[in-house]
Amino acid sequence: MRYRVVKLRDVTHDCLLNGDVVRVVEVEPSAPPVSLDINSAREGSIVVYQSSGCLDLSCNHHSLCHPGGLESGQRIQIQKVGDKLDCALGRKLVAVKVAYAQD
């Protein structure tokens, strides 16, 4: 999972790994944007994420098709459906803002 820092606290600790001082923070889950098949992208719905399997590293949408912080089989809730994407493989995809689904 990915997280977003929402608050810095005034508490610090010595890091035993590198000797630096680390700061306590508050975080919240922050799922990355993804690409989904246009037929399954419905705002509010919960879907099981499946990686596209595309290996084209030069594609402009590679980060949407292989988002860090999501794995195949993970449940996500679709928050907002964005623009259609041009897929070199001919798939009908859209960019989607998602959240990690609550179990």
Image (cartoon, rainbow, N blue to C red):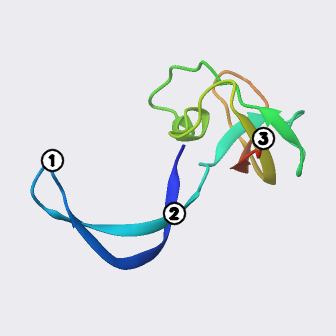
Rendered residue at 45%/28% (across/down)? 57
- State whether residue 103 is above or below residue 89: below
Rendered residue at 72%/30% (across/down)? 49
| Residue furthest left as drawn | 19
Residue 17 is marked as 1
Reading the image, the residue beneath label 3 is 103
Mark 3 element type: loop
Q: CA distance from mark 3 to mark 1?
A: 34 Å
| Res. 42 image quadrant | top right
Q: Residues within 10 Å of mark 1 (few under 14, many from 20)?
A: few
Amino acid residing under circle 1? Leu
In this orientation, does residue 93 appear?
no
Of residues 100 and 68, which is closer to you in this image? Answer: 100
Q: CA distance from mark 2 to mark 3?
A: 19 Å
Sequence order check: which comes first, mark 3 or mark 1? 1
Q: Residues within 10 Å of mark 2 (few under 14, many from 20)?
A: few
Amino acid residing under circle 2? Val
Horizontally, residue 36 falls left or right of residue 65, namely right
Q: CA distance from mark 1 to mark 2?
A: 22 Å
Of residues 52 and 61, which is closer to you in this image? Answer: 52
Q: Position of residue 12 (x, y in %)?
A: 26, 72
Sequence order check: which comes first, mark 2 or mark 3? 2
| Callout 3–callout 1 Cβ contact below 8 Å | no
Amino acid residing under circle 3? Asp
Q: Position of residue 15 (x, y in %)?
A: 18, 56
Task: Locate the N terminus by quadrant.
Answer: top right
Task: Locate the C terminus by quadrant.
Answer: top right
Q: Position of residue 2 (x, y in %)?
A: 52, 48
Residue 27 is marked as 2
Rendered residue at 52%/33% (across/down)? 59
Of residues 42 and 22, which is closer to you in this image? Answer: 22
